Image (spheres, coloured by chain):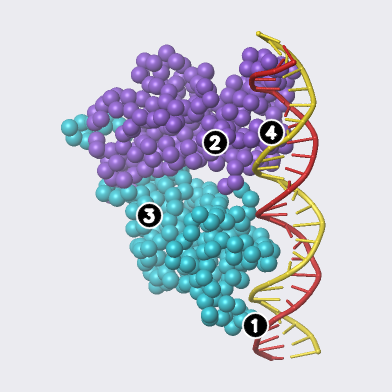
Chain colours: A cyan, B purple, C yellow, D red
DNA sequence: GCAAAAGTGTTACCGGTACACCCATGT
DNA sequence: ACATGGGTGTACCGGTAACACTTTTGC
């Protein structure tokens, strides 16, 4: 019994993935946006996306798109939500699955990104976007915030070595608020996930701040609760 | 410029929705499952599903499927996650979006359900299921638990009038644990969402327990935190 | 010495938890 | 009267938030 025989009376649809690509730079959470490369709405700012192929899962489609656009292949990725209003794309009936990705701005392939005309936008000053991409971003940000409040993100957004102040600033950027420095520090120390190194950052401060790194064996029992849910 | 001209070089896919239908009865959280009606794996237990049509969103496809299978048209519904492994369905390449629904077991069309051969299964004693449906269920349950810990579910699962004990038992069933009765009661009272009626349930107890109902204007500011996230 | 960032300590308060206790009523 | 579930009160404990304070170093 072939596929055609079984399901052939049902309609088929174009299926896309759209990636909300988060990065962190200059005390700001940023998003990588692209000028759309084809009609309709060619040239308008857009999330990077692509169509799902026959032999790949949506996760893999998103990874492939990211590989092609930022030149990285080990990327933290999370499914966000499906978008399927019949008229969401004026170019045709396309169902899209939104993903969010976390990447290190300093690690991605800048040349590749430049060639596409892409640009890192601060999350607080986004341009107008096509279709339902703004909605995708706002839900993706909520998801990132939830993850960050439970899990200690940073591994995906900061350099291998980082100071607690850098982590603190990252969290301020993610939640758009000022966490108390002392309390934040204590909270972080209470979960046993970071390892102090003997190195110090002497650029950002006079006294110097110890660099930390993530422990190899992540202890997933210890959950943070940076903000109340 | 027609749809064909723009996107025609990309593949199309079958797109389905599968519904995790939660109900509550006899102190247990239950799931409505169906014997699959066609090959492959005909007769095996399965979530109720259906294919997305050209002119409907996935949400509407799920609502249509629910309408056709339990005979209700105002149903609480939430998207769970997309499933797209190329080989997840041996009958063909089908991407599926899982949804969960909350319905009142006493309100649905029992005759319609019986005709389909469907059965309400306690969440603790599920049969083997086809494809990745067990995964869909476990994620849907997590989502339901999260919603219930933040929002006070009950409107969708209990009768219009209910006692605090009934709500307590519902929460015990959802979280598979025993909440302290006194503390549960206080927590519920602290969020201003229920209205005490003058009626009493005199069947379940000798003293009698007041019936409550949900207030018209839900105060979404007041969030519960039944369990820590 | 002073400014500036790193890092520690202190305290008051709030909310969760455990559990004891009283209440109303049918038998 | 007593068993049963409904409903209330209390006391302890731990986490959180606000904020004062100390440390180190470059200028």
Q: Nearer the viewer, mark 3 or mark 1?
A: 1
Q: Mark 2 and 3 residues: CB-CB less than 8 Å, in contact?
A: no
Q: Residue at x 68, y 67 (%)?
A: A182
Q: Which mark is residue B182?
A: 4
Q: Nearer the viewer, mark 1 or mark 2?
A: 2
Residue identified by numbered label 2: B177
Q: Mark 2 and 4 residues: CB-CB less than 8 Å, in contact?
A: no
Q: Nearer the viewer, mark 4 or mark 1?
A: 4
| Label 3: how many Cα within 10 Å (few below 14, some 14–19, many 20+) | many
Give the alpha-carbon distance from disc 4 to disc 1, as whole Å: 53 Å
Give the alpha-carbon distance from disc 1 to disc 2, as whole Å: 51 Å
Q: Residue at x 54, y 76 (%)?
A: A211
Q: Mark 3 and 1 residues: CB-CB less than 8 Å, in contact?
A: no
Chain under callout 3? A
> Does A2 sit left or right of B110 as displayed?
left
Query: x, y percentage for residue B24?
Result: 52, 25
Q: Residue at x 50, y 74 (%)?
A: A161
Q: Residue furthest left?
A: A1
Evaluate whether residue A37 shows in this view. yes
Give the alpha-carbon distance from disc 2 to disc 4, as whole Å: 15 Å
Query: x, y percentage for residue A121?
Result: 53, 64
Up the image or down, A144 lies above or below B139; here it is below
Q: Which mark is residue A207?
A: 1
């Amino acid at each position: 019994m072939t596929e055609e025989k079984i399901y052939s009376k049902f309609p088929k649809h174009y299926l896309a993935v759209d990636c909300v690509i988060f990065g962190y730079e200059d005390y700001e959470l940023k998003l990588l946006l692209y000028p759309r490369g084809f009609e309709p709405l060619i040239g308008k700012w857009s999330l990077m996306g692509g169509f799902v192929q026959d032999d790949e899962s949506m996760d893999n489609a998103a990874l492939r798109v990211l590989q092609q656009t930022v030149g990285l292949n080990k990327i933290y990725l999370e499914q966000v939500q499906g978008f399927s209003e019949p008229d969401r794309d004026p170019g045709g009936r396309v169902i899209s699955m939104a993903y969010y990705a976390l990447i290190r701005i300093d690690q991605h392939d800048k040349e590749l990104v430049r060639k596409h005309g892409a640009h890192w936008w601060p999350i607080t000053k986004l341009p107008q976007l096509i279709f339902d991409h703004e909605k995708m971003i706002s839900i993706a940000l909520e998801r990132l915030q939830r993850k960050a409040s439970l899990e200690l993100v940073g591994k995906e957004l900061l350099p291998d070595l980082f100071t607690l102040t850098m982590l603190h600033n990252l969290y301020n950027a993610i939640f758009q608020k000022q966490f108390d420095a002392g309390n934040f520090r204590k909270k972080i120390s209470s979960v046993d996930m970071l390892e102090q190194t003997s190195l110090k950052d002497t650029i950002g401060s006079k006294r110097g701040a110890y660099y930390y790194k993530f422990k190899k064996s992540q202890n997933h029992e210890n959950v943070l609760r940076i903000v109340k849910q």
